[in-house]
């Protein structure tokens, strides 16, 4: 069941991003918005890298550095 939940989360994320970016269109971002987006993308990349590593190696371990990035809000 958790596997299906993970696939659903990935699908929901990509669908939401497509909707948001289409709605934003040519508006662009203010500097504070840009900084916030880049901060969140750092977490998204870290989570995606973790998933990819787990899929390739079978190692599901969440190390402390990654945990800190994911919970840093």
Image (cartoon, rainbow, N blue to C red):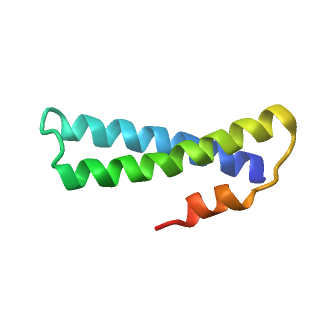
**Residue placed at 81% from the left, 54% from the top?**
61
Q: Could you tell whether 35 is left or right of 41 in the image? A: left
Q: Quadrant of residue 55?
A: top right
Residue 7 spot, x, y in % from top left: 65, 42
Residue 36 spot, x, y in % from top left: 32, 55
Task: Give above or below for 32 relative to 41.
Answer: below
Q: Quadrant of residue 20?
A: top left
Residue 2 spot, x, y in % from top left: 76, 53
Q: Could you tell whether 41 is left or right of 56 in the image? A: left
**Residue placed at 61% from the left, 63% from the top?**
68
Residue 40 spot, x, y in % from top left: 43, 52
**Residue placed at 52% from the left, 51% from the top?**
43
Which residue is at the far left?
A: 27
Which residue is at the far right?
A: 58
Q: Could you tell whether 19 is left or right of 53 in the image? A: left
**Residue placed at 75% from the left, 56% from the top?**
62
Pick the residue in front: 2 or 67: 67
Q: Could you tell whether 24 is left or right of 72 in the image? A: left
Total marks shown come to: 0
Task: Give above or below for 2 relative to 16.
Answer: below
Pick the residue in front: 55 or 41: 41
Which residue is at the far front?
A: 65
């Amino acid at each position: 069941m958790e596997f299906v939940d993970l696939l659903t989360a990935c699908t929901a994320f990509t669908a939401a991003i497509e909707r948001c970016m289409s709605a934003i269109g040519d508006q662009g971002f203010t500097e504070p918005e840009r900084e916030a987006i880049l901060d969140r993308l750092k977490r998204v990349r870290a989570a995606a890298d973790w998933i990819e590593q787990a899929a390739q190696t079978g190692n599901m371990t969440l190390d402390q550095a990654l945990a800190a990035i994911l919970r840093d809000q």
